[in-house]
Amino acid sequence: MLTAIGLMSGTSLDGVDIALLKTDGEDVIEHGPTHFVPYNRDLKVFIRRAIKAAIEGRDGAADIGKASGEITEAHVIAIEEFLEQTGVKRTAVDVIGFHGQTILHRPKRQEETAGRTWQIGDGKTVAEATKIDVVSDFRAADVAEGGEGAPFSPLYHAALIRALEPDGAVGIINLGGVANITYAPLGGGVLDLIAFDCGPGNGLVDQWMDLRRGEAMDKDGAAARAGKVHSDILRMMLLNPFIRRKPPKSLDRYDFKIDPVLGLSVEDGAATLTAFTATCIRASVPHLPQEPRDWIIVGGGRRNPAMIDAIGKALDAPIHTAEAIGWNGDALEAECFAYLAVRSLRKMPLSFPKTTRVPRPMLGGVHHRAPV
């Protein structure tokens, strides 16, 4: 058993989630304390500039380099704050799982030998500054071998599901900027896991609210609840070829656009985009061997009642939030990268053909040793 700290900063750019986990790389032995450190406004600006440069494919070395340095420093500060506030001893931590900040995710196209996934932040510097071993660059090996490079949470989801001892197949819907599904069949092993991105999660609604009201999200789903779904626009959005693609498949947060709803009121736009997320999830179910008996919703979108209601109606099945079954929904992704860091150290695969389309079970992560 190893003790690991996991760090995660998602595409919402809100800050760093930190979680401590004890695991042998198979089962979760113990959940430890968690913490969150928000990004300041300047750092968000640096990251957005880096994302813009990466998406446009232009020479943005200065913007990307600046953002990478700031991300690294922010994570080091977050770790030190976590250790101080929780009382966790530095010497008690075996490894840090440092995901970094994604600025581009572009899966392989048909004519390409490999796609690209780009997470900024320097794992070596984090190891030197914290004096704790670090595993970073989790996704690079998968993409280099032709995998999608995402989603990477299914293994951790499977470990959590095993502990529940379910009596049927379980589906986990992760509502981050992108929505993805993990399908765990009853009695199945890691090779039986199925996982893929479905479509947008919170990303489009967040972008819409920022554009129209300068707000980070549709808080409590209030705008969507006050609006009406424009079915004609929804049908048009559902023509996107990604939705019909067979999994495994993955997305970048910015692959879908809010352009179709630009002529709508704030409320109707939020309602239509919320319905789009729910319908994309429903459209993904036929790709599964069977419909899960239960669905568990994790990720930031679980806090949006309008989104939860829309998904519940679309699936017509029992839905539980992470907290309802005893999980810490805010810490889940940070815990995931603590778990994957231990698997990486133990030379255990991080991705599989049915989760990322990689040709074979794939090791991953780069180990940075702390200075002696």
Image (cartoon, rainbow, N blue to C red):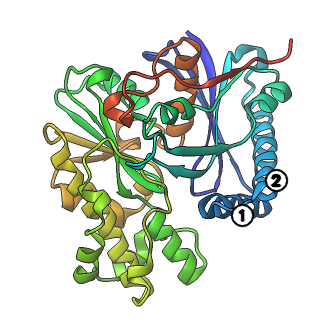
Q: Residues within 10 Å of mark 1 (few under 14, many from 20)?
A: some
Residue occupying image coordinates x 49% and y 44% = 115
The three-letter amino acid code for the residue at tag 2 is Lys
Q: Return the x and y of residue 122 as percentages of the image width and height.
A: 75, 36
Mark 2 / mark 1, whichever is N-terminal: 1
As drawn, 302 above or below 7: below
Of 257 and 360, which appears nearest the observer?
360
Residue 112 placement (x, y as % from top left) = 45, 46
Instruction: Tell me if 227 is positioned left or right of 11 in this view.
Output: left
The residue carrying pointer 2 sits among few (fewer than 14), some (14 to 19) or many (20 or more) residues within 10 Å by Cα, namely: some
**Residue 287 got which mark?**
none
Image point 16% across, 30% down: which residue? 168
Quarter of the image that includes the N terminus: top right
Residue 138 placement: quadrant: top right
In the image, residue 44 lies at what x, y percent?
72, 61
The amino acid marked with disc number 1 is: Arg
How far is the residue under mark 2 from the one under mark 1?
A: 10 Å
Q: Quadrant of the C terminus?
A: top right
> Compared to 252, does 92 lie above or below?
above
- In the figure, is residue 323 to the left or right of 30? left
Q: Secondary structure at mark 1?
A: helix
Q: Secondary structure at mark 2?
A: helix
Residue underneath mark 1: 49
Q: What residue is pinned by disc 2?
A: 66
Residue sitting nearer the eye, 355 or 58 = 58
Q: Does the residue at mark 2 contact the one at mark 1 (Cβ under 8 Å)?
A: yes
